[in-house]
Image (cartoon, grey):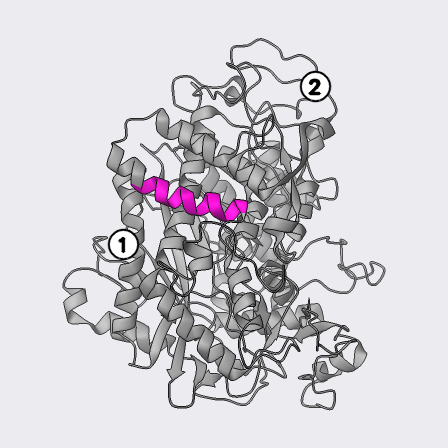
Amino acid sequence: MGLLALGTALDWPDAKKAAGQVREWGIEQLLGIWRKAKGKERDALLWGDEIEYLVVAIDGEQKKVRLSLCQADVLKALAKDEALAGRDVTVPDLQNGIAPTGALPTFHPEFGRFMLEATPGKPWGIDFKDLLAVEDDMRLRREIAKAHMDPDQFPITLTTFPRLGLPDTIKPDYPPSGPALRSQFVPDEIANPHIRFPTLAANIRSRRGRKVELNVPVFKDRNTPSPFNDPTVNYDLHNWPEDDDVRNGAVKQDCVYMDAMAFGMGSCCLQITFQAKNIREGRTLYDQLSPLGPIMLAITAATPIYKGFLVDTDVRWNQISRAVDDRTAEELGEKPLNNDRWRIPKSRYASNSTYIAQDHRLRQEYMDPDLIVNEELKQKLLDGGMDDLLATHFAHLFIRDPIVIFSEDLKELDPEGSNHFENIQSTNWQHMRFKPPPPGADIGWRVEFRSMEIQITDFENAAFAVFIVLVTRAILSFDLNFYIPIPRTTENMETAHVRDAVMREKFWFRKDPFPKKRTPKHSPVQSPVLNGVSEPSSSTGPPSTLQNGAQELNGSVDSPLGPVEEEYSRLSIDEIINGAQDGFPGLIPLVESYLDSVNIDIDTRCRLAVYLDLIRKRANGTLWTGSKWMRNFVLTHPEYKGDSAVSDKIVYDLFEAVREIERTQGKKKHTGWEMLSARERPSGLDD
């Protein structure tokens, strides 16, 4: 999360009146950025990772774990540490005016007061020594954070706190409800007090016309009531008008119900940001990584518990999507359009809906047939010289209203700034994000890969970060083609939520990723275009239409393309990651082919192989996902009663187990070995 601006935030009625002005000014700023940066070139790809922590207070005497609302205290302690300050800036938000050197990692605030975000002090390069330094840097971040916490506080990399929303689960404790969230489960004090966050929550609720609704299917065990009616819901509250929501059908049967932004934005994840060599390379990465989002979501699954109950899903994505869903009843299709302009198929936190690369392989059939675009703003972008694909992408993002508007920003447009553009851009939380260079900064075009779940250990987080970086190298080096229709990626995101989807489900994926003219199957050839030897013909100007007939890089024409449905099929995660016999070659074999093609010493190759082995075994099922391990931990706990409920004692023991896994890495049959060191797939109670 970037620096947080201060100002006078407008409540929703006033923000709604100013929304059109913010969109218009945002488009003007975008055009200014694009004109200046469209020809920007960087020497090489840079990248960075982002780790988010839950901070918990562990009470050994009471056998109790609570979320610790200590974010501000930890950040202040880090900023005031003279020993650290003598080496580098660690909290940019509190150490303005000091030039960072990149020697130490940096820490940032997040939505929840129980959360911390940590990033490397400077971007990683593509040099292999940087890849091998990631895990140590992640470990250093955890150590530095812990050193500035109280003795009973710990930074834990779990996606969610298992009992968030139940009594006595935060420290210090506050009664639930408040004017911003109006939740019957969590207090306003759980959110970062910076004016942006309570305003974001309140204006989403106000725009929507009711509280957000999260209903997650409960895991049905032998003693789970059927039907299951969430026993934590109070139907007799009358503190706020929105308390009527539960009496008007907000709570769904057989689901765990939640009603506040904190249940989504209080989740932790692992994000990777790539700085491309230029805009063309950035657009290529955006498109080609997009179909991988659901795959990496499923293989990193780590979210099987909500509000004290096992649930029948494994990942966080849809819960965050619903937690920030500001669509009105008309936009959701629940009422006929009268006051609103569009029926909008997705939340503003959702999977991608656009492709943006000027790629001769991009077919019209791949595009989203239900895409909603602000046509007036798209025309402004086209008139400003932007090509149709990119104009469509941004005009789609700009169907949304700005949620947090500062009155000071409405006085005068800063044509050299980006505040109005970022107001819309940064609150479109799609699983990929295409980011123009910030004005006045020595930064290039960037792409965020946002779908992965946070993992328990620094080793796992480093492995997944390094893997996706190596995949980008293979994509660019071999000119790989992962295009599938956007609706299939949307469907895959839903499939990724299925319990144990890695083993039980199949995902739509392209069957042949290679350029048409190449050596025999499964023998990738390095692309001269994307290695900088030559430019593709499409780079001389935007194509007038998406082509049904593609042109080869050497100018010859492909044979006519067949039905798009023949280009992809349903594959298991194992087949996508490790390869299918006489089918898709597999992401790991593609990465290994890339490593074969570059100069790399044996020691480095062996160390990278350890990371790839984790990914390989997660994909083929030898190693459990985090969700599988946590679910089995609960199911086999002596206090578990077979009723889906996850008690305080179970959560305490779970966090003690997580801390042990951090220490032992699951080796030699230590706790967590099923996720980290099993040689064959263990059986679990939910198999």
Mark with earlier residue (2, 1): 1
Vertical comparison of 515 with 224: above or below = above
| Relative to 597, residue 631 above or below | below
Q: Amino acid at mark 2?
A: Leu
Give the extent of the magenta segment: 607-620
Secondary structure state at the residue bearing disc 2: loop
What residue is drawn where x is 39% and y is 48%?
Answer: 463
Answer left or right for 129 relative to 241.
left
The quadrant of the picture occupied by the C terminus is bottom right
Mark 2 crowdedness (10 Å alpha carbons): few <14, some 14-19, many ≥20: few
Q: Residue 474 at what x, y percent from top left?
A: 44, 31
Question: In the structure shown, which secondary structural element does the residue marked by tag 1 occupy?
Answer: helix
Q: Judge by depth and name the residue closer to the eye, 3 or 353.
A: 353
Vertical placement of 551 versus 573: above or below?
A: above
Residue 595's disc number: none
Magenta region, main secondary structure? helix
Identify the amino acid type marked 1. Asp
Q: Position of residue 116 (x, y in %)?
A: 39, 68
Give how far across and how far down residue 120 sits, in percent. Answer: 31, 54
Residue 127 visible? The answer is: no
Residue linked to disc 1:
136
Q: Residue tagged by mark 2?
A: 561
Q: Please identify the quadrant where the N terminus is shown.
A: bottom left
Residue drawn at 35 percent across, 61 percent down = 118
Can you name the residue that lies furthest to the right here? 336
| Residue at figure coordinates x 60%, y 82% from the top left | 185
